[in-house]
Image: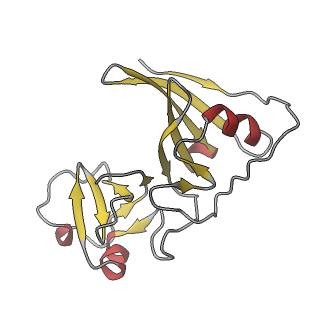
Amino acid sequence: MATKYDIHRHANGEGDIVIGLDLEIVPGKSIGGICLGDNADDIVWNILDEFDVQAFDFENFGMKYTCYRIDDGAISFSANEAGNIVSLCCEPPYTGRFDRRFYPGITAGEIKARSKRQELVGGYLVLDRNYLVYYAMPDEIDDFDRFSDLDDDVVFNELHVGNLA
């Protein structure tokens, strides 16, 4: 069972990590200045003066992780027991984009207009064969044959950076 706790301010005086809710999303690498492989403690302790950070522990297939949520999920990341960030995600109000076209909170209609190819891989929506950035399917969507079957007003809030290849 997950436990939730608030992270409290830690004054170390060495805040050199720059995090922003409007920075470019880099497929396979980063969201908001946080990179896959970064140390979660380094990130958290350096951003507490500017952002609200919450965390909860969880297990997945017997492995223990901690999920951190910055400003109610604008950016979320999970770290393994060693403290390395292994997953990144963003949701509105995050305003950064990747490829200047795609962002969290985009509609299916906008995706159809801005991408050439849409495919489902492991329950995620991959655009234009870029397997390094992908959308989680909205909770209310569970049965359809093709992406083109979705109503144009369906909203894709959760954007992930990783590698589905």
51 above or below 158?
Answer: above
Residue 4: horizontal and vertical position, in percent? Answer: 55, 23
Count of residue discs: 0
Residue 150: horizontal and vertical position, in percent? Answer: 22, 67
Q: Residue at x 32, y 77 (%)?
A: 115
Q: Is residue 69 left or right of residue 10?
A: left
Relative depth, front residue between 73 and 163? 163
Residue 119: horizontal and vertical position, in percent? Answer: 22, 64
Q: Residue at x 73, y 53 (%)?
A: 18
Image quadrant holding the N terminus, namely top left
5 above or below 40?
Answer: above
Q: Quadrant of residue 38?
A: top right
Q: Residue at x 31, y 52 (%)?
A: 164
Image quadrant holding the C terminus, namely bottom left
Q: Is residue 130 left or right of residue 10?
A: left
Relative depth, front residue between 94 and 64? 64
